[in-house]
């Protein structure tokens, strides 16, 4: 089981979401509004947020838990649909999940996802 975290530009969320709906076997995703900075430190970003003298860039954080065999298709879909060709398109991280538990039924493992 894998945990995929992707940071994408806010205006790309709809394209990414619509494409992920087509991935057979995907059980869902979570979306959060986040802000931060990368290597460019938000210097030339048109939509930067200034708080306490620190510039932040808004991004969307997507979290997905999936079967190992869906990982590459999901990552490719996000990468292709979130790509603008400009610096700061975002990042994708993949990690292994040891276990999952569905609170309502007590199911464990991939069945809980």
Image (spheres, rainbow, N blue to C red):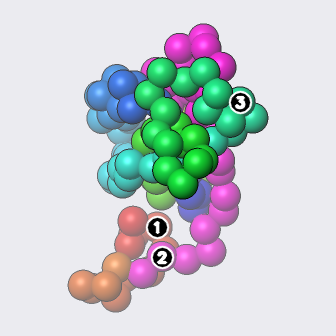
The CA distance from mark 2 to mark 1 is 7 Å
Image quarter (top left, top right, bottom left or bottom right) of the N terminus: bottom right
- Is residue 82 found inside the magenta-colored segment of the image? yes
Q: Which residue is mark 3?
A: 40
Q: Residue at x 65, y 47 (%)?
A: 93
Q: Quadrant of residue 113?
A: bottom left
Distance from the alpha carbon under mark 3 to that under mark 2: 36 Å
Residue span colored magenta: 76-101
The local crowd at label 2, few if under 14, some if 14 to 19, many if 20 or more residues have their Cα within 10 Å, is: some
Is 97 left or right of 65, judged from the image as shown?
right
Question: Is 105 placed above or below 58 here?
Answer: below
Residue nearest the viewer, comparing 111 with 74? 74
Q: Are marks 2 and 1 in contact (CB under 8 Å)?
A: yes
> Element under label 2?
loop
77 relative to 92 in the view: left or right: left
Q: Secondary structure at mark 3?
A: loop
Residue that badge 2 annotates: 100
Examine the image and state in which quarter residue 11 appears: top left
- Is residue 62 on the magenta stretch? no
Give the farthest residue toward the bottom. Answer: 106
């Amino acid at each position: 089981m894998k945990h995929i975290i992707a940071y994408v530009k806010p205006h790309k969320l709809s394209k990414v979401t619509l494409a992920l709906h087509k991935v057979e076997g995907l059980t869902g995703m979570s979306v959060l509004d986040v802000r931060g900075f990368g290597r460019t430190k938000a210097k030339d970003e048109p939509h930067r947020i200034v708080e306490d003298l620190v510039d932040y860039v808004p991004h969307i954080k997507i979290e997905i838990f999936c079967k190992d065999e869906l990982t590459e298709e999901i990552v490719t879909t996000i990468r292709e649909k979130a790509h603008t060709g400009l610096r700061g398109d975002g990042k994708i991280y993949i990690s292994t999940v040891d276990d999952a538990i569905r609170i309502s039924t007590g199911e464990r493992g991939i069945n809980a996802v």
